[in-house]
Image (cartoon, grey):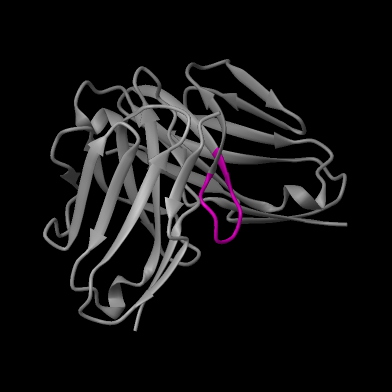
């Protein structure tokens, strides 16, 4: 149990375009979902927290207009990187937490490359 | 501010050579301490949650323990397939959005040679 999927696993896009990443909890309802970014050989950096049906809470330094997060249902959250630039290239990982639980279960990650 | 420090940064073991990974933490109030395993190019895989000092959890060759200041991940007779980065994270005992957050350590990269 507690499986989280992400799609796509890899995406290459041109500078200036937008890309959407989906995060789904497959076998549980996720009241809270999280989006992280990870640079090579570094630990995870939290970007934002989203509760179903509410606006996301962004961490300091994360541009909310650039990284649009939608958590429209208890099993789906999306991250849209708008007007992507090469510096946005990174490994993006989502996680999900069920109501009444403290563990976060992570998706497999999405490798974004902006050319 | 919550802080998590993991040591060593990297650890090389021979197959069968048992060892321990350390996670030292500072948190205003601990709701939970979590251990994850991360393979290259993949998301972290949940291993254990520990809630209070003295608690221990086991899974195959791994055993996690917790004190008021640190946690250990003991690896008994490791195999090459145990090679991965092991991440430790703490969650504070806060009744607001910050109480949802995990603060991660830098991880320990474990390499087990046959």
Q: Nearer the viewer, residue A58 or B88?
A: A58
Q: Which quadrant of the figure contains the N terminus of chain A? A: top right
Figure check: A78 above or below A88? above
- The residues colored magenta run B36-44
Q: Residue at x 52, y 17 (%)?
A: B53
Q: Residue B19 occupies which quadrant of the picture?
A: top right
Residue B104 drawn at (x, y percent): 42, 44
Tell whether B38 sits left or right of A90: right
Answer whether residue B11 is magenta in the image: no
Figure check: B68 above or below B112? above
Q: Which quadrant of the figure contains the C terminus of chain A? A: bottom left
Figure check: B37 above or below A17? above
Tell whether B81 sits left or right of A67: right
Q: Nearer the viewer, residue B98 or A68?
A: A68
Residue A101 drawn at (x, y percent): 40, 21
Q: Residue at x 21, y 46 (%)?
A: A70
Q: Residue at x 64, y 35 (%)?
A: B73
Residue A62 drawn at (x, y percent): 19, 57
Q: Residue at x 53, y 23 (%)?
A: B67
């Amino acid at each position: 149990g507690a499986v989280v999927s992400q799609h796509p696993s890899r995406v290459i896009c041109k500078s200036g375009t937008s890309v959407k990443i989906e995060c789904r909890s497959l076998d549980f309802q996720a009241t809270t979902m999280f989006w992280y970014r990870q640079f090579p050989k570094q630990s995870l950096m939290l970007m934002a927290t989203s509760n179903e049906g509410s606006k996301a809470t962004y961490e300091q330094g994360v541009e909310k207009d650039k990284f649009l997060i939608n958590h429209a249902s208890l099993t789906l959250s999306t991250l849209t990187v708008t007007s992507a630039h090469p510096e946005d290239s990174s490994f993006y990982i989502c996680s999900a937490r069920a109501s009444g639980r403290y563990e976060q279960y992570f998706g497999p990650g999405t490798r974004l490359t902006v050319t | 501010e919550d802080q998590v420090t993991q040591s060593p940064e990297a650890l090389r073991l021979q197959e069968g050579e048992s060892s321990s990974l350390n996670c030292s933490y500072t948190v205003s109030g601990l709701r939970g301490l979590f251990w994850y395993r991360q393979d290259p190019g993949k998301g972290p895989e949940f291993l254990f949650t520990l809630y209070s000092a003295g608690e221990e959890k086991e899974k195959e060759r791994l055993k996690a323990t917790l004190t008021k200041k640190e946690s250990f991940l003991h690896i008994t007779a490791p195999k090459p397939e145990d090679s991965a980065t092991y991440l430790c994270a703490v969650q504070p005992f806060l009744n607001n959005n910050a109480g949802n957050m995990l603060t991660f350590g830098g991880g320990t990269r474990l390499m087990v040679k046959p």
